[in-house]
Amino acid sequence: MVFDSLFGFFSNDLAIDLGTANTLIYKKGRGVVCNEPSVVAVEKGGFGGRRKVVAVGTEAKEMLGRTPESITAIRPMKDGVIADFEMTEEMLRVLIRKATRGRSLFRPRIIICVPHGITEVERRAVRESAESAGAREVFLIGEPMAAAIGAGLPVAEPLGNMILAIGGGTTEIGVISMKGIVYSESVRLGGDKMDEAVASYVRRRHNVMIGDRTAEQIKIAVGNAMPSADPEYVEAKGRDLVHGFPKSIVISESEVHEALTEPINQILEVVRRALEKCPPELSGDIVERGITMVGGGALLKNLDIRIAREVGIPTRVAEDPLSAVVVGSGQVLDRLEELREVVLR
């Protein structure tokens, strides 16, 4: 007990939202200290065939689709889980060093947010990556619980709280009451699938191939979950598939709405299933208290209004949807003894 207190005093305990699109780090007592894209740029064919890390985070994301043959920019997380163990470890090591500024008397305790439905093998991979990156002790927390705590929902009370977290790789929905997850579902659908849908639509409709970053920029600029009476427009650049030359096109808000129809419908289906499977007593609470949305996908224009209209339940976007998950994980870290029950065994 005394040693734990000393460790807590001298170490830099961290909470990490290890996301498909972005990795956020919360430092105990300081709040969110790091928000970087989950991208690693590596140089191929190094000594002994080992890949040499060239850049991590924002600098690496700028290289996506723009690197020479000797360098490749990769995303080590896919659909909310680790796709490249070695690069995830390297990315965590760099970001942890950045968050702690490289100064710590003891190795930090780390709590990491993971999709609630991941397998034991995937959980072990997350633990081992964090330990290899320098963690003294690793805890895991399910994303719906972390998101609900970060959004300020009363998870300890005997009330039904519904949280919808739309990240880069996964969409998670959870019904939470008395520090426990009563129902949850995780589907491998999120911002990345929306970007793919936009790129696919542009390819079919305009015969132009665009990159993932361009598709994401189009979605952010004019993405809309509902038809617009006065649509906006955005210019995009890509490669003409007929002649092979660079080409600029103008894309309307209405076109992007049409492109996003399928992923939005899939999200709506997830919400409907959760409402159908929710216990009757908690359903009454949800009708009264509504659905809370977090994650980057929650920022899609009018998505909250679309969900509310489709399911007939008030839906709101959390005050800080991008940081809710890591802030919730950080609050658990700050009050670990009080909230130990929410940590995954």
Image (cartoon, grey):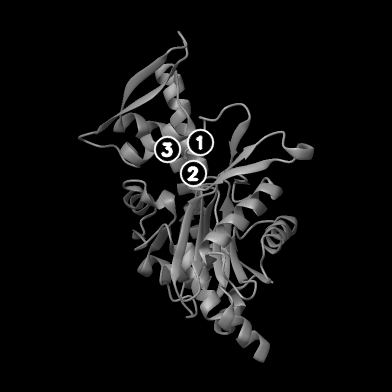
Relative to the observer, which residue lies in front, 177 or 114? 114
Residue at 44% across, 42% down: 264
Which badge, 3 or 2, comes first in the chain's sequence?
2
Residue extending farthest to the left is 230
Q: State the mark number for residue 216.
A: 3
Spatial separation of the CA atoms under disc 3 and disc 2: 17 Å
State the CA–CA distance, disc 3 to disc 1: 15 Å
Above or below, 301 against 212 in this view is: below
Where is residue 94, by image quadrant? Answer: bottom right
> Would you say 281 lies left or right of 97 here?
left
Q: Distance between the residues labelled 1 and 2?
A: 7 Å
Residue 159 horizontal side relative to residue 43, left or right: left
For residue 63, the mark is: 1
Residue type pointed to by label 2: Glu
Residue 166: where, in percent of width, then height?
Answer: 47, 52
The reply to whether the C-beta atoms of the residues labelled 1 and 2 are less than 8 Å apart is: yes
The residue indicated by pointer 2 is 59
Residue 55's x, y, as percent? 56, 44
Relative image position of residue 334 (x, y in whole percent): 52, 78
Instruction: State which quadrant residue 96 falls in.
Output: bottom right
Identify the amino acid type marked 3: Glu
**Residue 99 visible (yes or no):** yes
Identify the residue shown where x is 29% and y is 37%: 227
